[in-house]
Amino acid sequence: MALHRAGERALSCTRKRHRPLGLSGSFIQGVMARVDGVPNVRLDQCQARPGMVAERQNSWPSPRADLLKLFRLVPARWVRGGFEHTRLFPSGTRRFLWWERLLAFLAGEGRLDPAPPPSAIQPGRHHACDLLVVGGGPAGIAAANHAAKTGRTVVLATRGERLARGATAMGEIVTPIDPSVTVLTSHEVGALYRGGTLAVAAPHDDGPATVIACAQLTLATGKRSLPPLVPGNALPGVMDATTALALAARGSKALGPTLVVGTDARDRVATRLRAQGVDLVDCRPVAELKAVRGSKGVTGADCNGERIACASIVHAGPWRTDPNLAFQAGSAGELRLAAGEPAAQVTLAGFAAAPDEAVHWSGIADEATDICPCMDVTAAEIADLVRGGITHVEELKRQSACGMGPCQGFPCWELMNAVRAGVGGPHLAADRPSHRGPRRALTVAQAAGLSDVVEPLR
């Protein structure tokens, strides 16, 4: 947020073609940076403090004179495929080894200091409870309060630094949490095991990871807005409603002239942004957005033939539930995990239990329409693979590397499925690659601290 207010919107780059990325709320690669010598720090989960040194990772020889920007001139078709599926340098050849080294250099995320700072094992923590609630919004608070009133022990874990962060940003009145509930703020539950009765949560401040054993699990994770499937959808300045509301609460001028697009909730989001002092230029259905304009960041949008000048585009829909944790709680299979019905002890609550909204796609497979910008996967690449007979989601993932970046498949696989079904037919939409925990990174110190916390299965 501090960088955004200072006008620094392009915080990172895509791995292969080095196109600019920024704070979006959708693509984690856009906020990965090197902080005080430590690589791969998420700036959206890092508190700014005096003396902090934050550096762009994937630049050479320096962020101010970055020669790697020349790779933006490389045609997208030349760098299609995952690291092991290059079309120019076949696997098993000496050329492929050099290609891998080049891509690792371009990604710019592996450089460590020769003398790293000393670190100690973070002893893991353990909680046992009757009910674990994941999600600190109104639905999660209601589920936790109801269970606490019946005498059950409850743990509530939320990735927000405070409860009901999104609802508060929308101006809603939130019910207080029962004081008997153990609340873990700034903790992200990244892995579920044993049918959802064992969870691993990691804090954002690199403190000790926590193992939570529970008899019942409630997922109240809500829904997230998907980026529009149009050219320029990953440019710095395109962000989801939650991110925009958080920025506006700390300085409305950071957004600049703003266009809101989305589904039915767009008017509520636009009204709230306007109330916070944001310069709102228009509010349109997401189906009217045809392209986002700009090179280093958003400069405008094309809406049904009309050019709208703006510096930010906020999307409020289509809304979909991230299925990662539910998938982990109900997955089964030996060679490939498949989504199954969650166990009886696992329930969805609130917005997470509501039907997902359909992803809108115009049907134009453009190289400038990003599916997975972290790995430079475009709608054109997915469409060509499907037309070539590659339709299984696991094979699409492996052939393109879609969803294999830090976001771990959301929203990338939702966008991939929309293109897959649009090109190959609607019967292809009801599948997704396997989600495996942990869905978020653990530090070595956190992982080592869990070794004596959980009794292994025998």
Image (cartoon, rainbow, N blue to C red):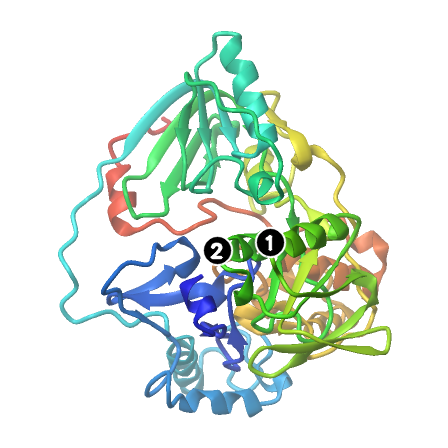
Q: Looking at the image, is 187 positioned above or below residue 180?
A: below
Please report whichever mark, 1 or 2, sits nearer to the chain's N-terminal start: 2
Q: Quadrant of the N terminus?
A: bottom left
Q: Quadrant of the C terminus?
A: top left
Q: Which residue is drawn at 51% across and 69% down?
A: 22
Label 2 residue SS: loop
Identify the residue under disc 2.
Answer: 250
Label 1 residue SS: loop
Question: In the image, residue 84 lies at what x, y percent?
Answer: 50, 73
Type of amino acid at the residue the image marks with label 1: Gln
Question: In the image, residue 299 lies at what x, y percent?
Answer: 65, 79
Tell me if 378 is positioned left or right of 248 in this view: right
Q: Which residue is drawn at 27% across and 50% down?
A: 444
Identify the residue under disc 1.
Answer: 276
Tell me if 232 is positioned left or right of 439 in this view: right
Q: Quadrant of residue 40?
A: bottom left
Q: Which residue is drawn at 51% across and 27% down?
A: 133
